[in-house]
Amino acid sequence: MAAQQLEKVTLGKSITNGLRKAMEADPKVVLIGEDIGKLGGVFRITEGLQKDFGEERVIDS
């Protein structure tokens, strides 16, 4: 069996990937938070999700 090479990922990127997978798997998943839409939140965790999933699923509060 060939050795599997792992990619190093930051905690923030891991959270982003998890949110993205959840939103892809279930159209009922909605994110609501302060500045999480256009700005991607303080730590940019949700950056790009509003563009990909729309303003009705990634909502600034």
Image (cartoon, rainbow, N blue to C red):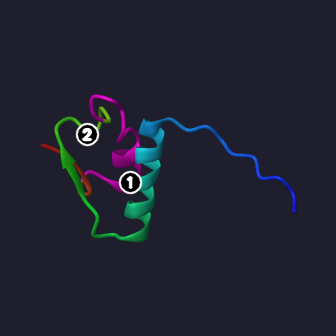
- Residue that protrudes farthest toward the top in the picture: 42
Mark number displayed over residue 19: 1
Picture layout, residue 25 above or below residue 32: below
Q: Main secondary structure of the magenta part?
A: loop
Q: Earlier in the sequence, mark 2 or mark 1?
A: 1
Seen from the viewer's position, the closer of residues 4 and 14 is: 4
Q: Which residue is mark 2?
A: 36
Q: Say which amino acid is labelled 1.
A: Leu
Estimate how packed mark 1 is, as few (under 14), some (14 to 19) or many (20 or more) residues with alpha carbons within 10 Å.
some
- Amino acid carrying mark 2 in the image: Ile
Q: Specify start and end residues of the magenta stretch as a single range.
A: 41-55
- Using the numbered discs, state the Cα–Cα distance from disc 2 to disc 1 in whole angstroms: 12 Å
User: Residue 50 placed where, x, y %?
Assistant: 33, 47
Q: Is residue 45 magenta?
A: yes
Total numbered labels: 2
Secondary structure of residue under mark 1: helix
Q: Quadrant of residue 36?
A: top left
Residue drawn at 26 percent across, 57 percent down = 57
